[in-house]
Image (cartoon, grey):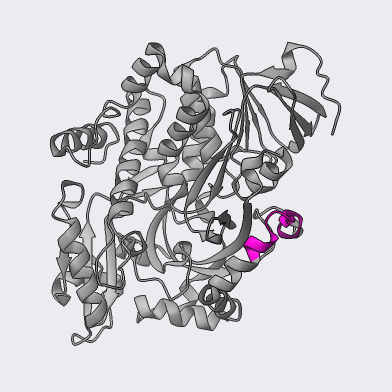
């Protein structure tokens, strides 16, 4: 408990958003577009926006649209392919493109500062995986969302698609690939900073950097009081709080005391990349090439070789390699994991651990890897790789969510929005696909927590202006899908 007294209206806000990464900045821009008079406070523990998971070197920079990520189309034991998630993610990413296109049309975003068109390729080895990839191609390409997908097992065609990967290979090696040329590479750090830049000058927006949230509590009338520690220690008040602090959101959710947060626990997974900035190699490869995940590996650990543009400079990235750290944030505390263990979630964590032995084995094998081991993994993609061209880089921290269900503790690999019963607090937990679907996730937050305003004709008209296809299911309406893609591609300079 803490003293909830505040000194006047300057400490009262319509919304307090914790974290200045891609999630909170997306929500802030949406709210500001819907009502420029809303008083918003963004609180960030670091010195500037987008330095944690949103930072370009802390993530893969893939515009996740299920074009190449095999884990979004898992195979059942009977051989059937599950495609629901692929279509859901593809639609969500199109909604992100739609939002960016609307902001670009208004002159509020410059696409070339964060967005590059780049082919997305799935690559597999061996007859069994080629057969599965062909099945995936057949099922997805029959729908409008993936109608431009190509499939090949021909080495000459593969040399055209992925020349760097094909150097030094035996022509008898069994390989298969699919390609969608309408893929993207995204600098989510630059996008976050672009969001912040467009709103930071508004009188209704306040941003506090180098500021920690120490505690938060709700009074009997539903107001939230948030204790801040920074250049100026103070207590602020709001009817709505959003916890978009990456891995740090779980700890804050637990501090809030809402019943909906009691059943969650977190398991942190760290990551490492091999990065190549050698110009000749970077110019030779022009794609995001995703392979198949190892048994037990989390989605974030699917091996891939990516072309990246970071602050405008082209480079190559390979990985990720998983590790373990008890931090919930890259710049967090080693005590994060231990502080998150409560009587309400400890049994869920134990059960999830017992149910995911393969994940434990995978992480252990990753932890004992040497740099030479990582280079050997890289050689699976690049047979003629020169170790001197690649250096190790520490990626961002991810916290996989463990949720208590009727079946016990379950490890959740995706993202999850947790809201209080009165809609006054929302928290975003989890990892993949994360930033790529931030727009859709934040619309979900608005629909849950700002229901009355979202039902108003004023906000509905503004949402329709930002999202011309929002009233249409573009996965079942091919004409609408093609129309919105044509608009998005033109406004975002992706043609």
347 drawn magenta:
yes
Q: What residue is drawn where x is 53% and y is 46%? A: 54
Residue 416 x %, y %? 50, 46
Name the residue: 13% across, 35% down.
479
Locate residue 232 relative to residue 430 in the image: left or right. right
Which quadrant holds residue 2?
top right
Tally the numbered discs: 0
Could you tell me what secondary structure mostly forms the magenta stretch? helix
Asked if residue 426 lies in the magenta stretch, the reply is no
Task: Indicate the quadrant where residue 347 lies.
Answer: bottom right
Of residue 34 and residue 341, the one placed in the foreground of this image is 341
Residue 338 x/y as whole percent:
75, 60
Q: Quadrant of the C terminus?
A: top left
- Residue 17 seen in the current view: yes
Q: Which residues are magenta?
A: 336-349
Q: Is residue 118 visible?
A: no
Up-down: is 96 above or below 301? above
Residue at 75% x, 38% y is 212
**Left or right of 198, for residue 463:** left
Q: Where's residue 426, x and y in %?
A: 58, 35
> Whole-percent x and y of residue 474?
22, 37
Quarter of the image for residue 307 reads: bottom left
On the rendered structure, is 347 left or right of 354?
A: right
The quarter in which the N terminus is drawn is top right
């Amino acid at each position: 408990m803490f003293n909830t007294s505040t000194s006047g209206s300057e400490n009262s806000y319509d919304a307090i958003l914790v974290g200045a990464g891609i999630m909170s900045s997306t929500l802030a821009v949406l709210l500001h577009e819907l009502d420029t008079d809303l008083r918003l406070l963004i609180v960030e523990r670091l010195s500037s926006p987008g330095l944690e998971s949103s930072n370009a070197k802390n993530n893969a920079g893939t515009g996740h649209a299920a074009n190449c990520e095999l884990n979004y189309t898992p195979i059942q034991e009977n051989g059937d392919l599950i495609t629901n998630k692929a279509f859901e993610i593809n639609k969500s990413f199109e909604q992100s493109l739609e939002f960016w296109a609307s902001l670009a049309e208004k002159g509020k975003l410059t696409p070339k500062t964060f967005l590059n068109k780049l082919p997305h390729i799935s690559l597999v080895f061996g007859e069994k995986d080629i057969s599965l990839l062909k099945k995936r191609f057949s099922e997805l390409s029959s729908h409008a969302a993936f109608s431009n997908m190509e499939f090949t097992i021909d080495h000459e065609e593969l040399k055209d698609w992925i020349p760097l990967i094909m150097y030094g290979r035996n022509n008898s090696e069994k390989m298969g690939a699919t390609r969608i040329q309408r893929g993207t590479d995204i600098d989510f750090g630059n996008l976050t900073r672009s969001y912040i830049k467009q709103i930071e000058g508004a009188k209704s927006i306040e941003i506090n950097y180098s500021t920690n949230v120490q505690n938060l509590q709700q009074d009997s009338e539903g107001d939230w009081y948030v204790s801040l520690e920074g250049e100026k220690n103070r207590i602020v008040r709001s009817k709505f709080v959003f916890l978009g602090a990456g891995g740090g959101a779980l700890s804050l959710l637990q501090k809030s005391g809402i019943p909906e947060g009691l059943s969650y626990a977190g398991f942190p997974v760290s990551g490492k990349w091999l990065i190549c900035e050698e110009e000749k190699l970077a110019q030779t490869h022009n794609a995001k090439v995703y392979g198949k995940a190892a048994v037990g590996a989390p989605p974030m650990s699917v091996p891939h070789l990516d072309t990246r543009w970071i602050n405008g400079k082209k480079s190559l990235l390979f990985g990720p390699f998983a590790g373990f750290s008890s931090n919930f944030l890259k710049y967090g505390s080693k005590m994060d994991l231990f502080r998150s263990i409560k009587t309400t979630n400890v049994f869920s964590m134990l059960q999830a651990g017992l149910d995911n032995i393969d994940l434990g084995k995978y992480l252990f094998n990753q932890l004992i890897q040497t740099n030479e081991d990582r280079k050997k993994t890289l050689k699976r993609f690049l047979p003629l790789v020169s170790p001197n061209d690649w250096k190790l880089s520490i990626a961002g921290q991810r916290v996989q969510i463990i949720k208590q269900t009727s079946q016990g503790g379950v490890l959740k690999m995706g993202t999850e929005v947790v809201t209080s019963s009165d809609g006054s607090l929302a928290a975003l937990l989890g990892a993949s696909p994360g930033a790529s679907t931030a727009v859709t996730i934040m619309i979900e937050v608005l629909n849950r927590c700002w229901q009355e305003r979202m039902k108003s004709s004023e906000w509905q008209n503004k949402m329709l202006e930002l999202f011309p296809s929002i009233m249409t299911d573009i996965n079942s309406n091919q004409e609408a899908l093609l129309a919105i893609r044509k608009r998005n591609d033109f406004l975002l300079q992706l043609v």
